Image (tube, rainbow, N blue to C red):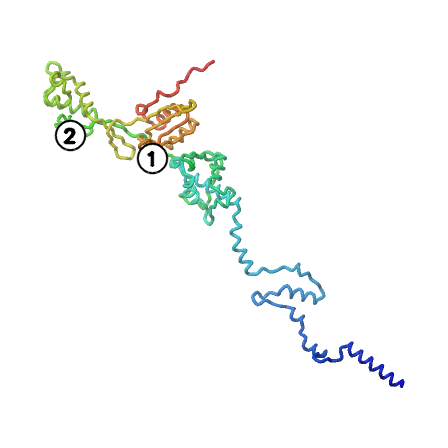
Amino acid sequence: EQEQEQEEEEEGMTEAGGVGNGAVNLPGTMSDADADADTPDLGGLCLDVETEQEGVTTPAGQATAGAGDGGVEDLETLPLAPTSTDAGSEREAAPAVATTPEQMDKLLLQCFLHALKCKVKKADLPLLTSTFLKIYMYPCCPEGRTVDIKRSSYKKLSRFLQAMQHKQIIQMREFSKGVESIAVVNWHHTELRSFTVPEEATADEMPLAESETEVVYQPPEICSFYSIPSRLLPLFQHAGLKKDAALSSVDVRNIVTNYVKSNELIDDFNKNYVIVNPTLCDCVLESSEYHGVSKLTWDDLFNRCLERMQKCHQMTFPGQRPVVRKGDVKAIIIDVAQRASNKKVTLVRNLDVYGVDAQKFGNILQQRAQASVTYITAPGTKGKLDLQVQGNQVHHVAKILTEEYKILSKYIEGLNKAPKVGKKKR
């Protein structure tokens, strides 16, 4: 009986040990040997994994290898290699980041000073701001770069030009509503004079000499003539002249003298008188004088002939063909008008007749008189400008016309309207 009890105890212990060690194979389960044979080596799969495209060991493989050597590395501290997509995006974004507002401001200033020093002439003023940007500033931009005002700190061309006006490099004017122009350039400004043209500028862009920028004005040669009307044609036919032929006063006197002498019309008793024949009667006498006047003095005969001839004038500008116009030459008119609040303005007309550029003349007058000048389109003309300057500036206008433009005072009207200089009170 004791032996049976010992055998039963041993069998119970064996059954308990088999269940705890997994020795008993239940249906559908594998043994330890089979499990070891089918289980893959995970460490071998994780180590030295290489990418097909790059051929670079991945950070996961490096971390696993380091752990196998006994060292533990922090995965967050490992540097990540940039992929090809990230590198391409960085190269594309590089040009956009290269130009900052500060760099664009410097480029704008460089092109602005370059255009003023090398391209703009005094005769071009006033100059529209849009024209200045497209025709003068854009060509001064260095090769490989582009002027973009929107990428600057100014954002607008008007703000940039106002900043230049604040520096007193230029002066802006609004000649028509909403249209601004560069009216005056301070060529003696230190920043403009100290500016050096970039090395890549060609010979055409080098600063122009003062002799090239300033065209010296030369007044025209004016000659008065008289054209032959149909009434006086019989008196000049013997000289081979036709109707509307232009003659000077000296030519008229010589032709009339030859006619009188050839027809023996000199009075025998008084050589200061000329006998009136039928031809002279029709040419120089009035109808009421036909029966009462038989003699005329030489001066009276010449004056009657000139009065009945049509006046004309010839203007010859240097390097141009002479131009003959009917009537007397128009004089430059200087007038003083009164405006509201007892303010006076000086008006200057007919500058174009003598080839004077109204805008250039206005710039000189503005600097001399230190007063604002406006341009008015002459009534009945296309593009011809008259000047209007604040205050009584007759003295300045006359001085510029006679001394700088060398126009004779007999061709200027209104010189007597200059303000009289009174005695200073002590």
The image shows residue 75, relative to residue 307, as above or below, that is: below
Quadrant of the image occupied by residue 124: top left
> How far is mark 2 from mark 1, CA to CA?
39 Å
Residue 310 position in % (x across, y down) = 21, 26
Q: Residues within 10 Å of mark 2 (few under 14, many from 20)?
A: some
The residue carrying mark 1 is: 383
C-beta proximity under 8 Å, tags 2 and 1:
no
Q: Residue furthest front?
A: 1
The crowding category of the residue bearing disc 1, from other C-alpha atoms within 10 Å (few below 14, some 14 to 19, many at least 20), is few
| Residue at the spot of label 2 | 241
The answer to whether one can see residue 83 in this image is yes
Give the position of the N terminus as an image quadrant: bottom right
Number of labels in the image equals 2
Say what secondary structure mark 2 lies in: loop
Percent position (x, y) of residue 391?
Answer: 41, 24
Which sits earlier in the primary sequence, circle 2 or circle 1?
2
Question: Which of the 4 quarters of the picture holds residue 239?
Answer: top left
Camera-nearest label, 2 or 1 = 1
Measured along the vertical axis of the image, is residue 197 above or below residue 327?
below
The residue at the point 29 percent across, 35 percent down is 319
Q: Nearer the viewer, residue 357 or 210?
A: 357
Compare residues 188 and 422 and report the one nearer the observer.
422
Residue 333 at x, y percent in the picture: 33, 25
Q: Amino acid at mark 1?
A: Gly
Residue drawn at x 65%, y 69% as measured from the top left = 46
* Residue drawn at 27 percent across, 31 percent down: 316
